[in-house]
Image (cartoon, rainbow, N blue to C red):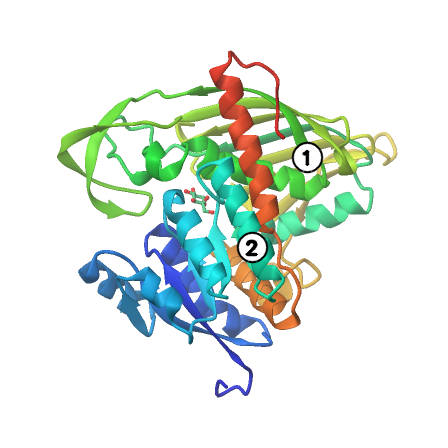
Amino acid sequence: MAGSGRPELRVAMIGYGFMGAAHSQAWRTAPRFFDLDAEPVMATIVGRNAEALEAARVKFGWESASTDWRRVIADPSIDIVDVCTPGSSHVEIAIAALEAGKHVLCEKPLANSVEEAELMVAAAEAARARGVRSMVGFSYRRVPAIGYARQLIAEGALGDVRQIRALYLQDWLSDEEGPMTWRLDKDQAGSGSLGDIGAHAIDLVQHLTGARLDTVSGTLATFVTERPLLGETVGLSGTASEERGAVTVDDAAWFTAKLTGGLADGAIGAFEATRYATGRKNALRIELSGSRGAIAFDLERMNELEVYDATAPAGKQGFTRIVVTEPEHPYMAAWWPTGHGIGYEHPFSHQVRDLVQAITAGTDPEPSFAEGLQVQRVLHAVESSAANGSAWTPTD
Ligand code: SOE
């Protein structure tokens, strides 16, 4: 038992890069701002380079460090395994953890292929029968403005959603001499912009509307095929070395989709994911147009939601900018006084909150591995469509 009298949940986090940093701050912060029914303990951080790992352990505040993830997973004192590694190792680590009876939080996209994701779903379902929980880290579901948009959509504010625009625009690869990272290597990342950031757009559209992307037609582009190899990692990228390596993923993905089910049955969508949108830093933009109204969200203004009511009297119509910083809005009561916004890191704390509460309540956290698999099917269908001249391709 922790000093608080609540049961402890001891966490092992595998990986200590960008996502490891984001998850570390969430494991530390969530129990300080939310009333949790269990106390997460930052037990062990895991990685391959012992020296860099020790520096990360100290910086992020983990109790211990290990270079052997198998040993950590076999440790009976560990309750939760948080997978923050490149996609290529998700399948092996997540399945081993589930089989060892550990609850698993796995970064997105769930895997590097549909086949891997299917194996992970099978392992998650077998573990679930033993009370073991699993969750995919589509953290943007837990942006308060997204949660609020979902509530409005469920209440019928948009009526039938007919058209969807979902763009995820970054520009950190615009510099052709920017170095390689694992995110540009298909063997490690599975795909490029498509899986790294397009997966968020797909997940959010499905989450907001309850519909599924049923059929897609897409095209992929790689603008820069060779880059300097990475010297030292800094944030998403890092310093360049003298040697060069091949970029083996898409730099940009464009696709259209037909949707079925939920509140967007029969809708059509336009999706774009790129890390070459010069000037756009982290613009995840979702715009949904429906029979009664519309909403628009931009992650670069994440504390705001634009809402349009098409039933308002003529002359009084127009997008209303709602500032989503009130205690009435999802998760916001835990943070700052009214009007004080939050940032990129907060949804990760919300993710920890929801996972811990689901584990203690014995319920299934969302998004499930099955939802992660469904996104994986869409990624695969876009790649297949692009390889076949943008042919309309079913996602199942
Ligand atoms: C994590 O959720 C993530 O998708 C990263 O993997 C991306 O690289 C980042 O740009 C957005 O957040």
Q: Secondary structure beneath disc 2?
A: helix
Horizontal and vertical percent position of residue 273: 49, 30
Give the position of the C terminus as an image quadrant.
Answer: top right
Query: Residue 326 sits in which quadrant?
Result: bottom right
Q: Are marks 2 and 1 in contact (CB under 8 Å)?
A: no
Q: Residue at x 43, y 32 (%)?
A: 193
Near-viewer residue (96 or 23): 96
Horizontal and vertical percent position of residue 321: 67, 43
Image-based side of 355 in relation to 111, left or right? right
Foreground: disc 2 or disc 1: 2
Q: Residue at x 28, y 28 (%)?
A: 175
Q: Callout 2: few (<14), some (14-19), or many (20+) C-alpha neighbours within 10 Å?
A: many
Q: Which mark is residue 44?
A: none
Horizontal and vertical percent position of residue 151: 74, 50
Give the residue type at disc 2: Ala
Near-viewer residue (82 or 229): 82
Residue at the farthest top position: 389
Give the residue type at disc 1: Arg
Judging by the rendered image, the residue that carries numbered circle 2 is: 124
Near-viewer residue (116 or 168): 116
Q: Callout 1: few (<14), some (14-19), or many (20+) C-alpha neighbours within 10 Å?
A: many
Q: Secondary structure beneath disc 1?
A: strand
Q: Is residue 384 above or below residue 327?
A: above
Horizontal and vertical percent position of residue 122: 56, 49
Q: Which mark is residue 212?
A: 1
Q: Residue at x 37, y 56 (%)?
A: 20
Disc 2 within 8 angstroms of ligand 1 (CB)? no
Asked if one can make out residue 284 in the rendered structure from this viewpoint, the answer is: no
Asked if one can make out residue 58 in the rendered structure from this viewpoint, the answer is: yes
Q: Is residue 378 above or below residue 347?
A: above
* Mark with earlier residue (2, 1): 2
